[in-house]
Image (tube, rainbow, N blue to C red):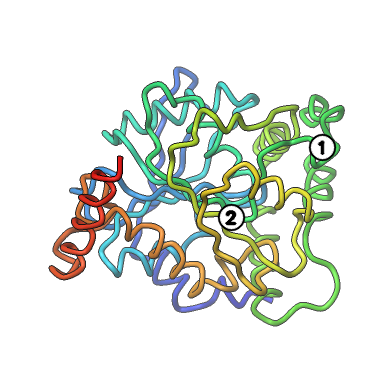
Amino acid sequence: MEEIRISPDYNWFRSTVPLKKIIVDDDDSKVWSLYDAGPKSIRCPIIFLPPVSGTAEVFFQQVLALTGWGYRVISLQYPVYWDLLEFCDGFRKLLDHLHLDKVHLFGASLGGFLAQKFAEHTHKSPRVHSLILCNSFSDTTIFNQTLTANSFWLMPAFMLKKIVLGNFAKGPVDPKMADAIDFMVDRLESLNQGELASRLTLNCQNSYVEPHKIKDLAVTIMDVFDQSALSHEAKEEMYKLYPNARRAHLKTGGNFPYLCRSAEVNLYIQIHLRQFHGTRYAAINSDMVSAEELEVQKSHLVNSANDQ
């Protein structure tokens, strides 16, 4: 039942990467929790944003693998924010506090929606260099909960957990996916009423992404072909919104591929980030990149500059 929690990788992660808590708002109760691993000299790291049920730990396999390859990785957990503007303002302050001008964002489900909204919110003074959107969406109306969004704050924690669990896979799944679901249920149990209610409010209050504001970003859309909480229509909408996006399709993986298909997910993240090697927006230490690869990247940059 607790395969991931007792795994050597998870215990190595918990014992070697410290959890930091940072307050950037005037309200002391708004605490960002994050794991920041890899070379601190990197000024454009990749930041992971979790789904409604997730905490900063859910991306531990990405943190371990990517830092092993030389990347700087930050996995975080948001404080209680009740509207998107408040979240975007808080996240911008967090980046200022960490002295990060621009970042790459990997967002899963709600995390992907928040990543898009933050990129849109800061488009006049860009803070996002690229996006990886995993099982994500661009319009909250797909959940048909916009009318109840304003009442989540009134509901007790057990009812909110029931709503979230309703989106988890039912029926037979392979052992790795079952372990991922168990781990996410455990993470869900660790969230209090305010955290859950505010995340569900952000997830469901009427809002959509305005693509013309973020059309110049490099985007990878990552999704699964098997059962997930996202409808086929929601996926198609994402493809339409980002016609030039790279697509990373996983045959299976359910709602949490970063846990149960981590090797594939990590490979797709690497492929996405490779296009920035040799630039000031590289999320990796240049010492970890071969001279041949840097030459190839530089020639790509020269060619694309000439094309423009």
Amino acid under label 2?
A: Cys
Indicate the quadrant where residue 153 lies.
Answer: top right
Question: Residue at horizontal 42%, vertical 48%?
Answer: 47
**Dot 1 alpha-carbon crowd within 10 angstroms: few under 14, some 14 to 19, many 20 or more:** some
Q: Quadrant of the C terminus?
A: top left
> Which residue sits at x=62%, y=32%?
209
What's the mark number on residue 278? none
Give the left or right position of residue 50, taking residue 306 as reference.
right
Which residue is most to the top?
A: 26
Label 2, on which residue?
A: 134
- In percent of width and height, residue 261 lies at 57, 73
Residue 184, percent from left and from top: 66, 61
Which residue in the structure is indicated by mark 1?
156
| Quadrant placement of the N terminus | bottom right
Q: Which quadrant would residue 266 be assigned to in this image?
A: bottom left
Residue nearest the observer in this picture, 170 or 143: 143
Q: Position of residue 69 (x, y in %)?
A: 29, 68
| Horizontal arrangement in the rendering, residue 161 relative to residue 40 (left or right) | right
Identify which residue is drawn at 21% across, 45% down. Answer: 280
Q: Earlier in the sequence, mark 2 or mark 1?
A: 2
Whether residue 289 is situated above or below residue 115 in the rendered picture: below
Q: Looking at numbered disc 1 in the image, what kind of residue is underneath it?
A: Pro
- Nearest to the observer: residue 119 or residue 202: 119
Mark 2 surroundings: few (<14), some (14-19) or many (≥20) residues within 10 A: many
Q: Secondary structure at mark 1?
A: loop
